[in-house]
Amino acid sequence: MSDTPLFVVAPPIRCFHRLELPELPVCARPARWIRPSANCQPDGYFCDEHRQRTDAPIAEPTLIRRVNVTLEVLFAATSWTAGCAHAEALSRLERAVESAGGVINLHAVGSVIGRCAAPGGRLWPAGARTHPQAP
C-alpha cells in the first residue's frame, strides 16, 4: 500500500479483544501482537492476555486507523497568568487522554477572563432557567 500515509503523531496501539461489558466494548490495553489476515488489513492487535498462539509481534511500520475527535475542553484556571494556566490545564488533559490510550496533537490553547454565572463553577442542567439550588 504505497499511498498509505505515514503518521508522525500516532497513539499507542490498543487491544481489539471484544469484551461482554456494555460500557467497555473492547479491552483497549496496550497491544504487542498482531493477528495477520489474508488481505492487507490485520484482523486485529492484541495484548499479552488476549493473544493467540498464531499471533506475531507487531512490527513497524504497521497499519492503524487513527481517530481524531474535535472538541472544546474547558477548565477554570489555577493561575491568573495565561502561560501558567494553559500549561497546567494541558498537563492535566494530557494525563487524562494518555490514561485513556490517546495522545494529544495540540493545535491551539486560549483563555479568557470572565464572570461565572453558576456559583462555584457548577454546570446548570440543560434548559434550566434558574440555578438548581435557587429557592
Image (spheres, grey):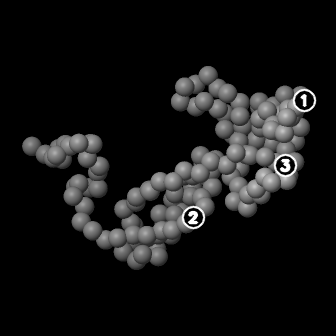
In the depicted structure, whether residue 87 falls above or below residue 52? below
Q: Residue at x 67, y 27 (%)?
A: 18
* Residue 80 visible in rendering: yes
Q: Quadrant of residue 80?
A: bottom left
Q: Are marks 2 and 1 in contact (CB under 8 Å)?
A: no
Secondary structure of residue under mark 3: loop
Q: Quadrant of residue 50?
A: top right
* Residue 36 percent location from the top left of the image: 86, 34
Secondary structure of residue under mark 2: loop
Residue bearing the label numbered 3: 1
Secondary structure of residue under mark 1: loop
Q: Nearer the viewer, mark 3 or mark 1?
A: 3
Q: Residue at x 85, y 53 (%)?
A: 2
Residue bearing the label numbered 2: 106
Q: Residue at x 71, y 34 (%)?
A: 16
Give the class, few, some or many, for how many residues have Cα within 10 Å of label 2's Cα (few <14, many ≥20): few
Pick whichever of labels 2 and 3 is earlier in the sequence.
Answer: 3
Residue bearing the label numbered 1: 54
Q: Left or right: 122 with respect to 59?
A: left
How much space separates mark 2 and mark 1, taking CA atoms? 38 Å
The three-letter amino acid code for the residue at tag 3 is: Met
Q: Quadrant of residue 125?
A: top left
Question: Where, quadrant-wise, is the C terminus in this rendering?
Answer: top left
The three-letter amino acid code for the residue at tag 2 is: Leu
* Residue 118 percent location from the top left of the image: 23, 54
* Residue 15 percent location from the top left of the image: 72, 37
